[in-house]
Amino acid sequence: EGKDGEGKDGEGKDGEGQSGEGQSGEGSEGGQQQQQQQQEGVPARKRIQAAEEKMKEAKQKLEEAKRKESVKAQREAEEELKQAIAELEEILRQLREEEIERMLAQLAGRFRKMKEMQLKVYEDTLRLAKVPSDKRGDDYPIRANKLSVAEQKIVLEADRALTLLLEEGSSVAFPETVQQMRDDMEDVAIRLRDTKVGRLTQGLEEEIIQTLDELIAALEKAQQDMEEQQQQQQQ
């Protein structure tokens, strides 16, 4: 508006276009960004305590205004209380978003680690399966058991992911899918322990890897959606 509209027609030169709308608007926006940055540097507990203190003070002012039967003071106190409540709600919303972001990042990192571990077991399973039956010596069951132990470690990672999901209690991510994948991992561990390295075991491992790919992609999409939503809220 500053260049195409009011600025060129004269209002901008007289002061309204540039100093009024342009600078004050930018100043307000800059002030909000500075305030937001300052708030981000303050521990969450202190931010909540400060907001609750504002609510307490506003309630006290409101009660005092009611006792004095001052309509003006009552309206001002009600507005202060309304603003304090809104501020507390905003802080809690931001903290909730930060909590979800951390959970998404933790899950994505854990699933990537699990995929790396599963790929290693899968490749070793294929390698072991290629050994001809007549050349499978005494160390063959030992090698298969080592793969079973490695698979069991991935099961533990899946258990940790499930714990994180259940503690979060969020629908962001699919505990049932993770539970089914975890059960498949358990089956693979048992089959490897029994030196069953054929197509059925390999197929289960392939399904686990595919599920991990899908979970990682879903988490990355959720992270991207949250970032876009936050950018829209800041505009």
Image (cartoon, rainbow, N blue to C red):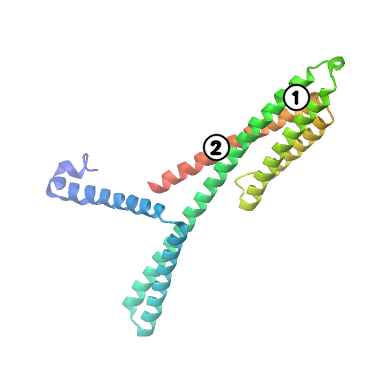
In this view, the mark in front (1 or 2): 1
How far is mark 1 from mark 2, CA to CA?
Answer: 29 Å
What residue lies at 78% left-to-right and 26% top-to-bottom? 143
Report crowding for label 1: few under 14, some 14 to 19, many 20 or more residues within 10 A (C-alpha).
many
Q: Are marks 1 and 2 in contact (CB under 8 Å)?
A: no
* Residue linked to disc 1: 125
Identify which amino acid the numbered label 2 is placed on.
Answer: Glu
Which residue is the site of mark 2? 220
Against 96, residue 111 (above or below) is above
Can residue 202 be seen at all in this image of the molecule?
A: yes
Q: Give the image location of residue 211, x and y in percent.
A: 67, 34
Place of residue 134 in the rendered image (x, y in percent of width and height, measured from the top left): 87, 15
Please provide percent x and percent y for residue 223: 52, 41
Quadrant position of residue 216: top right
Q: Secondary structure at mark 2?
A: helix
Left or right of 215 in this view: 137? right
Q: How many marks?
A: 2
Query: In the image, what residue type sits under mark 1?
Result: Thr
